[in-house]
């Protein structure tokens, strides 16, 4: 999403090095591109960790691209926030076109690039479509967002377990959405949805930014 201030230098360097080395080492075990999903609650650090991992892989001369779930919301940020305030039942995966995101991932894996990419503009509050500039020789595709653990066409999922109570100050500082009296209720509802995703993850990053492995 354009307009967000994501600083990958804030990421834990040891964690990012570990992740990028691990993914680099497993490239030959999967058909390319290897698709990695970073998911977790708002403010958990998934955007920072994913962006830092992208940069680290590029330093290894790996062709890598990232899709952000924020670009697949059904509505621009201000309208999404308004709908949440109108009814808390509007908070959840149904706010996002995950089916379209999954379809785009599948097309990328199949070598197809004949579709436009979505780009949500945070500050200006609108969605645009842009030319698809993803390399046909892509090695790694990163996807990041709150609900990306629900995507079907990924190879590995990385779950950040930090909760909204631990990250609320960070979220307010980023001004992800207009702050309202309902924001705590919104974050609590999101928390109750996202906390169940840990069981779907191949890798869990705990609140101390340490790796916990599960599954394969």
Image (cartoon, rainbow, N blue to C red):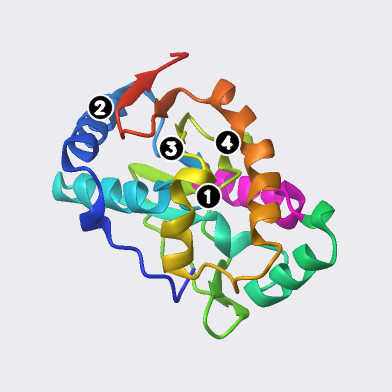
How would you classify the magenta stretch by its main secondary structure?
Answer: helix
N-term-proximal mark, 2 vs 1: 2
Q: Confirm whether the magenta stretch covers residue 105.
A: yes
**Rendered-image quadrant of the C terminus:** top left
**Residue receiving disc 4:** 149
Mark 4 residue element: helix
Above or below 196: residue 68: below
Q: Is residue 200 left or right of residue 16?
A: right
Image x and y of residue 169, in percent: 44, 58
Mark 2 residue element: helix
Image-quadrant location for residue 33: top left
Q: Are marks 2 and 1 in contact (CB under 8 Å)?
A: no
**Residue receiving disc 3:** 36
Mark 1 residue element: loop
Q: Are marks 3 and 4 in contact (CB under 8 Å)?
A: no
Q: Is residue 179 left or right of residue 144?
A: right
**Residue receiving disc 1:** 145
Q: CA distance from mark 4 to mark 2?
A: 19 Å
N-term-proximal mark, 4 vs 2: 2
Disc number lying in front (4 or 2): 4
**Residue receiving disc 2:** 22
Q: CA distance from mark 4 to mark 1?
A: 8 Å
């Amino acid at each position: 999403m354009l307009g967000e201030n994501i600083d990958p230098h804030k990421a834990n360097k040891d964690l990012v090095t570990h992740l990028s080395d691990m993914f680099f080492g497993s490239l030959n075990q999967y058909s390319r591109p290897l698709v990695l999903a970073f998911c977790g609650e708002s403010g958990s650090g998934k955007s920072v960790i994913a962006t830092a991992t992208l940069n680290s892989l590029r330093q290894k001369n790996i062709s890598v691209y990232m899709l952000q779930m924020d670009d697949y919301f059904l509505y621009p940020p201000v309208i999404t926030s308004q709908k949440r305030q109108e009814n808390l039942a509007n908070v959840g995966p149904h706010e996002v076109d995950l089916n379209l995101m999954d379809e785009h991932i599948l097309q990328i894996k199949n070598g197809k690039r004949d579709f436009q990419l979505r780009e949500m503009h945070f500050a200006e509050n609108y969605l645009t479509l842009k030319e698809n500039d993803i390399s046909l020789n892509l090695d790694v595709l990163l996807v990041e967002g709150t609900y990306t653990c629900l995507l079907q066409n990924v190879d590995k999922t990385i779950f950040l377990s930090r909760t909204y109570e631990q990250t609320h100050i960070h979220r307010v500082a980023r001004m992800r959405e207009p702050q309202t009296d309902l924001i705590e209720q919104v974050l609590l509802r999101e928390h109750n949805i996202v906390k169940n995703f840990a069981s779907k993850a191949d890798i869990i990053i705990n609140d101390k930014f340490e790796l916990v492995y599960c599954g394969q």
